[in-house]
Image (spheres, rainbow, N blue to C red):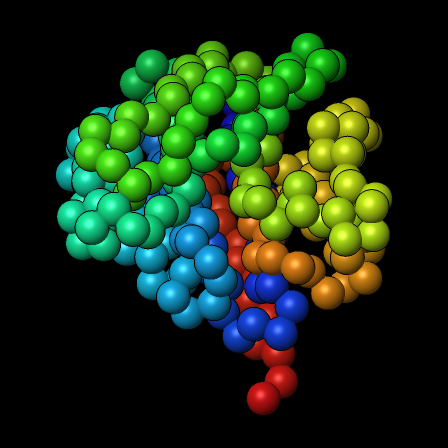
Amino acid sequence: MEIQIGVAKINKYAMSESGDTLEVVERPSGGMSVVLADGQRSGKSAKFISTMVVRKVVALLAEGVRDGAAARAASDYLYTHRNGQVQSTLNIVSIELENRCLLITRNNPLPVLVYQDKTVRTLDERSDAVGLRRETRPVLTQLELQPGLTIAVFTDGLPFAGERSSQPMDIPAAFSRLVDAGSAPQAVADGLMAEALTLESNRPGDDISILVVGVREDTPGDQVRRMSVHLPLGSR
């Protein structure tokens, strides 16, 4: 099997920086983790918060700390430094090679979408953002790695898309349609982003970050790991 990861991100309209931060880290025991945080508010202040949370989690994961413990530590860290006055959502998606599983860690009221056996279900158990109180615990879900499994994680800019024009986006339907069409994870992330931007007239009302992780049949004999990043610089 092969793990494919697709990411699409865009800033809130007229903002120079996104309040969302996403990082990828290799796990000491094999596999990798993707960490996504959305800081309170938007712009530079939100970026500072989300970066603080993500860097704390990434550092702990790289040392072999378990995902749930890393999320709790990041919450306590933010709480201590901001006296419980600032929050951030946090998602960790880990590919664990030891247990051959996909581990999803949520500190986010928004759901995670799971496509499996040609159906989409939501992981929507109540989950609180980090930083508001001590001992905030994440919600953990473990899924067996199987070809066809695909998940989507996103920040609140995606469900916000279309609300101003009373045309909210049907995210599960769009996700299912894209995966049913055989789209790779990057194409799924791009497709969701394109639909959101259409609803927002290319002026997103909030930062949007979309992470899609899929399990596919690999190419026989190909053991090369690849990563591709596209970063538009824009104009000054």
Q: Classify 133 as above or below 97.
A: below
x%, y% of residue 200?
Answer: 77, 57
Q: Name the foreground residue: 85 vs 57.
A: 85
x%, y% of residue 16?
Answer: 53, 75
Residue depicted at x 16% and y 48%:
80
Residue 229 horizontal side relative to residue 67, left or right:
right
Q: Name the foreground residue: 208 vs 227.
A: 208
Tally of numbered tags:
0
x%, y% of residue 90?
Answer: 39, 40
Residue depicted at x 42% and y 15%:
142
Residue 216 horizontal side relative to residue 42, left or right:
right
Q: Is residue 20 visible?
A: yes
Q: Quadrant of residue 211?
A: top right
x%, y% of residue 97?
Answer: 35, 22
**Which residue of the protein is positioned furthest toward the bottom in this rendering?**
236
Residue depicted at x 54% and y 20%:
123
Q: Is residue 217 visible?
A: no
Q: Classify 131 as above or below 201.
A: above
